[in-house]
Image: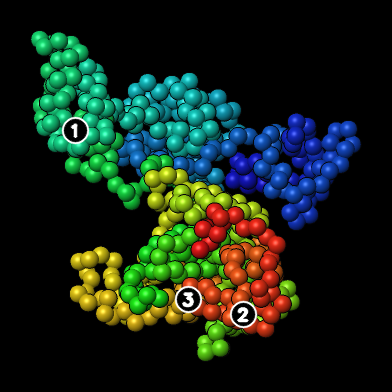
Amino acid sequence: MSRTAARRPVVAVGGHVVFEGRTWQVAAMDGSAVRLVAEDGTVTSLLTGYLCAAADFAVVGARPAAGVPQWGLFETVPVREQERALAWQRHLQEIECGLPGGPGSTGVPRPAYALERPISERVEAKAAELAALGWAGVSAATIRRMRARYRRQGLWGLVDHRTTKPSSRTGRADEQVVTAVLEALRRQRGRSKGTLAGLRELTRQVLAETHGPDTGVLLPPVSTFNRLVRALADPRELPGCPARTASSPAAPFTPTMAGRPGEQVMLDTTRLDIMAVSDHGTAGRPELTIALDVATRSILAAVLRPAGTKAVDAALLLAEMAVPHPARPHWPACLQLAHASVPYERLVDIDTRLAHAAARPVILPETVIVDRGTIYLSSAFRAACETLGVSVQPAPPRQPAAKGPVERTFASINTLFCQYVAGYTASNTVERGRDVEKEACWTVAQLQDLLDEWITAGWQPRPHEGLRHPMMAKAALSPNDMWAALIAAHGYVPVPLAGRDYIELLPTRWHKATDRGIRINHRTYDNRVLNPLRGQPSGVEVPRSFRTLTQ
């Protein structure tokens, strides 16, 4: 056995180890498995990694080895202390193995450090040598203490930490001045920001109130006072920083993480940066409500409404994301699910409707994250979530960054889709054209078709910087690729809603079936299936409040 092997604990056949409070003998080792026999004859087999990771694991009779050098911390100390620690390491290694270069180095040990001599004599010889070299205060006891520190902490244990201790933030500043500065910062918290000069005057007033107008406590010079304020104040409280922002999250902030499709789905509504032609013939900006899967960044559903999104629209969004999206007849074949990088045959075996579906995920969410808007807190939306077994999680108030993925997706829709559509309004009035209303030529229904096609052709196969493969971290994945990877990794198989379930989630309206059919919003709908129902009472007494709600 080499000197290097002797320095490190080794698990070998015939050796003894401590595991779960008992002493075991290693009887056999086969690959990654080890077979142990206890003193009372008990036999057990377990993985070597599990054995070595146990809290009480130890190799019986093994000498403690020096710790791994903590180079990150070691490089933070002054160069002079680094050189002194490295010199100590060479001397200690010569005591241990006879050579300054440590185990494995070549050469012949000096007679005073021959391995045949007792370790105590080698320590005494080294103490005499260092004293002759001018090392003040180094005795045999000092060397024994440094050997113990080297065994526990490695090279970091040889550093003189008395010289590396960080200095106080406030230096030699008067404690009364420090207390006054902290009180001045507290009084300024939440108020409009001023300058450092104004904070200095406020600190002077605090000292006068606390210790009297004739106090002997003087403020330090301006430059010293400014350094003291920067050391004591939170970076957001410094004069000149914004007093409040709407985009920065309150610390601490934890980004939203999801590991499987549907684990977290974010719902949100915004006005689209496009002018659309309404049923009245006027132009206006429609409202877009989307469902974004956090794990795959897939847009599971997107619903456009002229204005005033209601709770029934949010419930409809749940139904849209849980059923296959049919591919339009005029779409190219490459936009069908059969041509996407997903286990198509496996999915079609579960639901034959996927044979003619668009290349978009079908995911039934586990948890939906919503803001505190009226439509998401309504009884209609919560009833729809309860029907599907979906948990509703409201986002924290006044923290827009809690729904960062869906907010960034809205920005992407505006830049990747809206600006190429006639009637684009831009994101603010400064960038808006003069006659945007006259450019509007698409209805809300037509925009919905365009948006659905863009999601399938432009968003789902587009690489996303936030999606990375665990084995290829430098390659960005598309939402469809991430969906396929998570299906393979987590065994996730979507079970789409049946047609009846989809109908149950649609909004309900009560209307009379007359001889001319059913009239809704100045449009008449008629079919043969209405013949037995024409002029017949339904037998359901609809409350007036419900009729008003659904009109």
| Tag of residue 102 | none
Q: Which residue is mark 1?
A: 227
Q: Which residue is mark 2?
A: 515
* The quadrant where residue 212 appears: top left
- Image coordinates for residue 338, horizontal then vertical, percent: 62, 83
Label 1 vs label 3, nearer the camera: 3
* Gap between marks 2 and 1 measured at Cα: 86 Å
Residue at (31% x, 37% y) in the render? 78
Residue type for callout 3: His
Give the CA separation, mark 3 to mark 2.
Answer: 16 Å
Residues under numbered marks 3 and 2 in contact, where contact means CB atoms less than 8 Å apart: no
Mark 3, secondary structure of its residue: loop
User: Residue flagged by tag 1: what amino acid is it?
Assistant: Arg
N-term-proximal mark, 3 vs 2: 2
Decide: is 28 above or below 406.
above
Q: How far apart in space, not on screen, are marks 1 and 3 (Cα)?
A: 72 Å
